Structures are given as C-alpha cells and as structure tokens.
C-alpha cells in the first residue's frame, strides 16, 4: 500500500497537504473539517476580529479578484489579504480565546493530522490594549493549549517583511530562537519570498533552529478599480497569491532544497490540484501548503486529491513520499546554467533562413541580442552559427516566417 505519511521533527502526519492559515482556518469547525478531509496539518489562525471570536466566518476578510467568476485556472487572480481592516475589532482577552480554541480543535481531532498554531506578534494582545504577548509567550501558551507545532507568521507584508529579513537578520534569528527556547514543539518559520533572497532567508531561519521553513509566495500587488480609477480601500496590504504563482514557488523550492538538503520545507503559493502537490514534492518539498484552493473549492477537494496522488505514486512504483521527494532536482537548471550549456556545446546550427521568404526587413538582426544575424546588402538575412545560441527571438518575430528551426 502506498504510504502518504510525512515525518519531520518528531511529528508523524497522515498526508503531505498542509492547510495554511487564512479565513478558512479561523474557526474550530473549519480546522476540524480540514483535518477530517485528510490534511496532514492545519494552521489555526484565529480568532482574528470580533466576528470570528464568536465562531463566525468573516467572509469579508478576503476579496476575490477581479471577481469570483474569474477565479478559475488559466486566469491571473489572487485573494487579497484584507484582515487589517478588522484590527480595531480585537476583543479583550483575545489570546485566551485563541488558546481555548486550540484546545477544542485538539480535543475534536484526536488521531488526525497536526494542529499548528499560527502566531504573530502584531495585534495579539492580552486583556488590556498595549499588553502584547511576545513570540516566546505565545509559543509556550500554544503548546500548553495542545498545539502540535507553532508557525511564526513572518510573511505578512511580503516585500516589507523580505526587506526586514535582509536588513535586520537578527530580527528573524531572535524570533526563531525565542520561540524555540519557550517550547518543545516544532517551530515552523513562515517566511516571505518577495523583497529578499528566499534561499538566504530560509538558511538563516534553519541556522537559528527552525524545524521547518515555510516560504510563502504571496506578492504585493495592486488592483486598480477602473470606475474610481484608483486602488480600492480594502484594508490589509494587498498580498496576492493564486495559481499564477506556482511556477515561482516551484523554482524557489528547488533552490532552497538544493541549498539545504535536510530542513523540512513547506512551501506555499499557487497549489490548486494534486498535480501541483506532486510538483512541489518533486523539487524537494516536505509538504505542500494550500490556502486559496480550499477557500475557493472547499475541503471536499482534499480526499480526492490524496486518492489521485496515491494512484499516481502506485502507477510510478513509488511506495512512500521519500521516493518522490526531490526526484526532479538533478534535472533542474538555473537560467545561468542553461546559457552556459549553449556556450559549451559550440556553434548552434539549429536555425536557418529560407532565402525565398526573407524580405530583408532586418527585424531579426535588430532583435538578436547575440549579434548573430546580419542583413547582407539590404537583401537577405544571414546567420552566424558561431554566435547564435538558438534563443528563438528572431523565429517568433519574423513577419514572413522565413526563419526555420528544427522541431522541438
Ligand atoms: C486571504 C488570506 C489570508 C491569509 N492569512 C494568513 C495569516 O493570517 N497567517 C499566515 O501565516 N498566512 C496567511 N495566509 C497565507 C496562507 O496561509 C498560505 O501560506 C498562502 O496563501 C498559500 O498560497 P495560496 O493561497 O496560493 O495557496 C493567508 C492567505 C490568504 C489567501
């Protein structure tokens, strides 16, 4: 039987799907539902705002872009975080409510996946305004309440967070060390991918003692409303995710795994199917984080995704996720390496010009970055194979389709 369990930092989880914090994990019910659907872990983010403290789901915590009907594969869309709008709602005793909820989720999900407490310094207050809990205190309280792991919410405000990590590496180091010292459950550092070098930032967190790194591809975007011709005020910071970000998440996951073969990586950004989960595993992810997908489709997609993943593994003859993880890494090439490959193999003889079709317009010579095409006597283009790398710019630009190249 194909085994979908995941082990890291002493945890044993039933599947590689990590349901990331968002409006879909703000209540006891939604977290229990995610775990019952087969999630390996769920990241409890609430309560956040008076509404969810009373157990309601605040549908206005996020906004569809450009509209819900556009939220389908093939479109560039993302869900914008607008949680900032509700900061003023924070009820007194919020931290206690959060810990009670953790205990309740744990009670109702025994034997299922892990409960991860998502903690962040900003906005988490005690009974009095201004009485803020430190990262360490929140980590300790989360463990006492029954959480299986703690995730440090360091990703919000992506580009600002990224800049902070680069300019003040001690900040990240100190937060991880403080949380680590305050509890004995695993610490997951949730990190930005924008405004920084994600490889360097993940390395920093791992060196400071994080048991897992969770780089998240949410980017600061801008939505212009064409009626008002300005940016709508949704609150929050306009952090966008969605399926368009998956190739970026995949590329960074591969680079982070190449840099650090050991630390658990739980990347997030753009996962919308079981195939996307497989893609991240293939470049070395320990688990794949999902958020936009279940928000749009509901947790009903998870059991089917896990069945399909299992079937694919059976077909390939993989018995466990260890057989899948990192399988694509040896074949990954950085763009620099790809260019080097062209230079190493000598002149590229692949393209040629159909003399009959060439009208000598010179568009190909103009676009060639490698100075490999010249129009002789203003009549026909000629290729210098010693300089051509086969990038294909001329091929796509030629107005008369005179440039030919072998079938890929
Ligand atoms: C509306 C929204 C709110 C989010 N809120 C939080 C949060 O409170 N804490 C956190 O660590 N991550 C938060 N995230 C990030 C997700 O947990 C997850 O890492 C990320 O969205 C994964 O990318 P995807 O949405 O493309 O799947 C939020 C994401 C969305 C879409």
Image (cartoon, rainbow, N blue to C red):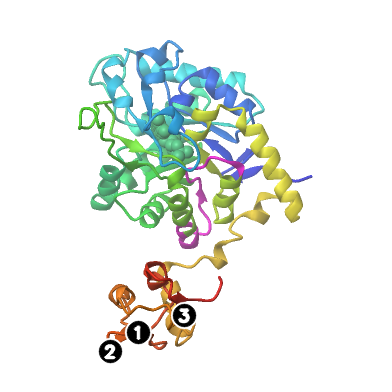
Q: Nearer the viewer, residue 383 or 153?
A: 383
> Which mark sits nearer the N-terminus, 1 or 3?
3
Task: Determine if the magenta segment contains residue 258.
Answer: yes
Q: Secondary structure at mark 1?
A: strand
Mark pair 2, 1: CA separation:
7 Å
- Check if residue 99 falls in the magenta segment: no
Q: Please state the extent of the stretch shown in magenta in the rendering.
A: 255-274
| Secondary structure found at label 2 | loop
Q: How far from the left and from the top, in percent, is residue 121?
A: 31, 31
**Which residue is rendered at x = 27% and y = 89% of the image?**
377
Dot 3 surroundings within 10 Å: few (below 14), some, or many (20 or more)?
Answer: many
Q: Return the residue nearer the eye: 344 or 16.
A: 344
Residue 336 as seen in the image, left or right of residue 132: right
Q: Which residue is mark 2?
A: 377
- Comparing 387 with 24, the one in front is 387
Report the residue marked by disc 1: 380
Circles 2 and 1: CB atoms closer than 8 Å: yes
The residue indicated by pointer 3 is 351
User: What is the residue that sits farthest to the right in this orientation?
Assistant: 1
């Amino acid at each position: 039987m194909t085994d979908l369990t995941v082990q890291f930092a002493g945890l044993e989880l039933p599947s590689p799907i990590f349901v990331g914090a968002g409006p879909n994990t703000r209540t006891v019910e939604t977290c229990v539902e995610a775990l019952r659907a087969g999630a390996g872990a769920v990241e409890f983010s609430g309560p956040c705002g008076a509404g969810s403290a009373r157990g309601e789901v605040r549908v206005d915590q996020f906004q569809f872009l450009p509209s819900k009907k556009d939220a389908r594969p093939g479109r560039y869309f993302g869900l914008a975080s607008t949680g900032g709008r509700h900061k003023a709602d924070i009820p007194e005793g919020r931290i206690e409510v959060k810990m009670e909820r953790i205990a309740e989720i744990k009670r109702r999900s025994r034997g299922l996946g892990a409960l991860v407490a998502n903690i962040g310094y900003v906005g988490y207050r005690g009974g009095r305004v201004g009485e803020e809990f430190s990262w360490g205190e929140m980590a300790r309280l989360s463990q006492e309440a029954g959480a299986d792991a703690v995730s440090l919410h360091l990703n919000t405000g992506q580009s600002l967070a990224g800049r902070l990590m680069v300019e003040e590496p001690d900040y990240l180091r100190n937060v991880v060390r403080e949380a680590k010292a305050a509890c004995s459950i695993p610490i997951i550092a949730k990190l930005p991918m924008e405004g920084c070098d994600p490889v360097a930032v993940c390395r920093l967190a791992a060196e400071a003692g994080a048991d897992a790194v969770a780089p998240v591809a949410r980017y600061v975007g801008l939505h212009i409303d064409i009626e008002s011709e300005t940016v709508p005020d949704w609150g929050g910071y306009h952090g966008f995710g969605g399926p368009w970000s998956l190739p970026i998440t995949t590329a960074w996951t591969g680079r982070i795994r190449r840099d650090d073969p050991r630390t658990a990586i739980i990347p997030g950004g753009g996962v919308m199917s079981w195939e996307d989960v497989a893609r991240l595993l293939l470049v070395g992810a320990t688990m794949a984080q999902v958020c936009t997908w279940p928000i749009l489709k509901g947790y009903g997609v998870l059991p089917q995704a896990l069945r399909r993943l299992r079937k694919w593994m059976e077909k390939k003859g993989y018995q466990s996720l260890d057989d899948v993880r990192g399988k694509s890494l040896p074949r990954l090439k950085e763009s620099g390496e790809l260019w080097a490959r062209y230079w190493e193999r000598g002149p590229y003889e692949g393209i040629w010009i159909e003399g009959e079709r060439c009208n000598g317009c010179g568009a190909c010579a103009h676009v060639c970055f490698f100075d490999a095409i010249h129009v002789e006597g203003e009549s026909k283009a000629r290729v210098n194979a010693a300089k051509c790398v086969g990038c294909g710019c001329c091929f796509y630009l030629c107005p008369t389709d005179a440039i030919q190249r072998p079938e890929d």
